[in-house]
Image: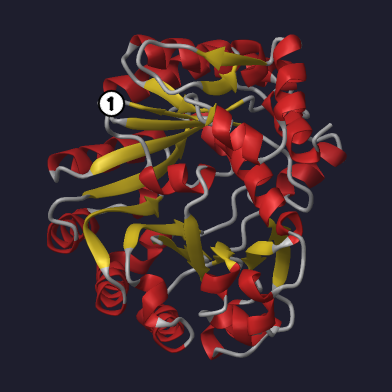
Amino acid sequence: MPVALYVHVPFCASKCAYCDFVSVPGSVDSADVDSFVGAVLRTLRQDVEPEVLADVPTIYIGGGTPSMLGADGLVSLLSGIAEVAHVRPDAEITVEANPDSVDAALVEALAELGRELTPAGVLRVSLGVQSFDDDVLRTLGRRHNAAATTGALALLKNAGVRVSLDLMCGIPGQSPESWRATLDTAVASGVGHVSVYPLTVEEGTPLARSVDSGQSAEPDADVAADMMETADEILHQAGIERYEIANYARPGQESLHNTGYWTGVEYLGVGPSAASMLSVRTAAKTFLERDLGLVSACTASEMPLEPGDIVSRVRFVQPPSLDEFLSGACSESVESEWLTANEASREDAMLGLRLCRGISVELVQEANVTDVIKRLEADGLLERAHEAGAVDRWRLTRRGWLVANEVFGAVWTQE
């Protein structure tokens, strides 16, 4: 089976007010970059059996701010991965970047590397823009301004690199006019992919402390919902269609890596706090065996249980410590979740409903959620897709899209 690869780069120039991702703020020198790249490649060589990486359809370098590795660091990382793994010639490679860390040398190096590693594939840069309004960017604690984004987009476009923009709405002080202007600017930039997220206040962040102290207003969920609908309207008119709850793309420019998350593709995460989702058989061929003590008795064929109770999938998250990752130390703090075959099917059904195309009737039956699906249909949250020539599928209605978490919860709990 194909296994997608995710690498978490924990470096950031500074911590944004709303961010709860694992990252280490501050400057990064060449020694830091070399140590991190070396740790990633050592992990893949020493702690992952070759067959796990024998068919890699997508690579996603996320963070943090991966572009802080610089041109040389990213080239070393991706070239090294290509030596360890069999990356498909038509693979999709995505690198996250912030506008203030994008320069001509970085873009040129990425474009050239993309041509070498995936001659029939796609190199994407996911740009953390959030807004084209400088006042809104200051509220979020972003380092860049709209001018930096414009410059980064020009460099990427001239190099022929595909770009995805991350935008954020529902931000205190963000007016409907500001949001529309950001969307219009995104459309005018000619990018092929846009992700739209409502601001959430995560516990322990500077924004959470500011809201708790009364210094900042709490985001209004109704305002955010209105802005999400505005985004849907403006992007649709521009031919950038929604294919997942928060993601929009021009035809053929959907994110293959993220789509894998929603359709049950196995993925391996490397780096501090990196998440993985693997079958038990695949997981037993990785560092998870060392960290969690996986043994052959956990494999499905050897477990004396009923078919519905067979453990078939494991999700696990690496420890957040950068020092621990760099040292290669064995950790007892790996977070893991074990799923039975039935739970795995329910998870696939729940996540698959994020996609506009929905899920097949066969998956609904396999996950044993037919009664739940029909109740959600009666509530106007799901509908049966009957387009000409299309596979019979269940998908969210427009009303269901607005209360999607309610739908997902019902499918997962079968209630």
Residue 344 position within the rendered picture, expressed as x and y whole percent measured from the top left:
65, 51
Q: Is residue 275 visible?
A: no
Quadrant of image for the N terminus: bottom left
Q: Is residue 329 visible?
A: yes
Residue 411 vertical placement versus 259 (above, below):
above
Dividing the picture into quarters, in which one does residue 82 lie?
bottom left
Residue 123 vertical placement versus 323 (above, below):
above
Residue 348 position within the rendered picture, expressed as x and y whole percent measured from the top left:
59, 43
Residue 210 position within the rendered picture, expressed as x and y whole percent measured from the top left:
78, 41
The foreground one among 196 and 68 is 196
The foreground one among 397 and 331 is 397
Classify mark 1: helix, strand or loop.
loop
Looking at the image, which residue is at 34% across and 41% down? 148
> What's the colour scheme?
secondary structure
Quadrant of image for the C terminus: top right
Looking at the image, which residue is at 44% across and 89% down? 46
Residue 92 position within the rendered picture, expressed as x and y whole percent measured from the top left:
29, 51
Looking at the image, which residue is at 30% across and 39% down? 163
The residue at which mark 1 appears reads as 251
Looking at the image, which residue is at 66% across and 74% down? 319
Residue 168 vertical placement versus 398 (above, below):
below
Q: Which residue lies furthest to the right in this view?
A: 213
